[in-house]
Image (cartoon, coloured by chain):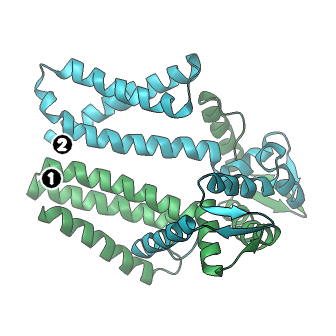
Amino acid sequence: MTIFSIIFLSILFTLIFVTFHLLFLHFLNLKKIIQVFIPFILSNLIIIFFLKENELYKLFYHSLVINFSILIIYIEFLFLIKTGFTLSIITLFKSRKRLLYKELVKNYASGKGAKWILTDRLNKIKKLKIVKQNKKVTLTQLGFFLSITLIFFRKILSIKDFG
Amino acid sequence: MYPYFISILFFFFINYFISTILKKYTFEKFFIYVLVYFFIVGFYNLIYLKNINFFTIQTFFSVFILFLYAGLYRSVSVKIMIYLYLRKKSVDFNNLYKTQFKEKSFDKRIKILLDSNIIFKKKKYFFLSTKGKSFLNKFLKIQSIYKIKSSG
């Protein structure tokens, strides 16, 4: 019964959190990270406020851990609809009924082209000083260390291929 | 503390075992494994252990491990970094694009879409299937709710 009460609290949190996030998104012009984190904090505070004198209050800390899990899922979902590679290919058919392979490559990401995604990701890791790029691309010391860490985690999770 | 460690160790052990048995261990298969493991352990906890802390930690662990796996399996940046590490030398951008990105990422995604019947190929042209059209409509609605104008 206790587990179901925790699930109930987390469902309540999700409803408040998503509503707040959408309201922030449509009515306030804030940075994307703030648009997610302020609703997360606000939703938890609202739940604490209304549960203060309730039996369920004791379970709030358990629910908070699950709320963090929900936040991770939600951020992953937002990333997926914004930067999803496969999903972006499907959106190419929004304006065209049929496409040649060349056109898929050329029109990818609203006409930026498939090469753009590689340039974009390279620029992002270049900003984090993971790679250096002149004419050729090279790993920095930090990149070298991070790559070993990533390979280690891939081994632990038994990941053999790339998706 | 024992149930946490045993449950996590078992998770990695069974995961390793499954990955050696299955020919292709994709994210979808890992996702199913995490769900099944979560429900089996959760059910055992509900009946025998009745430990709320264990339930919350198990939930967080399952989500976190899925998040980590998705990043390590699909991320283009991770792919670039590991490729550069394994090559042990500088790589030409155009070469990286042609061999690692276009063939192994872009073409692979098109193959996934073809295999899952979301798109189909007729002569030289790619078309969106009925399933694909319905998927696209739903996806565009979600994008408009989240004010996303372009993706990639």
In this view, B132 is above or below A148 = above
Dot 1: few (<14), some (14–19), or many (≥20) neighbours within 10 Å?
Answer: some
Which of these two is toward me, B41 or A61? A61
* Relative image position of residue A18 (x, y in whole percent): 44, 29
Q: Is residue B62 left or right of residue A55?
A: right
Indicate the colour of chain B.
green
Q: Is residue B88 left or right of residue B1?
A: right
Query: What amino acid is found at the position of numbered circle 1 in the picture?
Result: Leu
Which circle marks residue A28 in the picture? none
Q: Which residue is mark 1?
A: B46
Q: Is residue A104 left or right of residue A29?
A: right
Residue A1 seen: no
Q: Which residue is mark 2?
A: A3
Kind of element beneath mark 1:
helix
Instruction: Report which quarter residue B143 is drawn in.
Output: top right
Q: Chain of mark 2?
A: A
Q: Which residue appears at 27% of the width and 43% of the height? A: A65
Dot 2: few (<14), some (14–19), or many (≥20) neighbours within 10 Å?
Answer: some
Query: What amino acid is found at the position of numbered circle 2 in the picture?
Result: Ile
* Relative image position of residue A13 (x, y in whole percent): 33, 30
Indicate the colour of chain A.
cyan
Tag 2–tag 1 contact (CB < 8 Å)? yes
Residue A96 seen: yes
In this view, A137 is above or below A42 = below
Q: Which residue appears at 18% of the width and 22% of the height? A: A51
Q: Chain of mark 1?
A: B
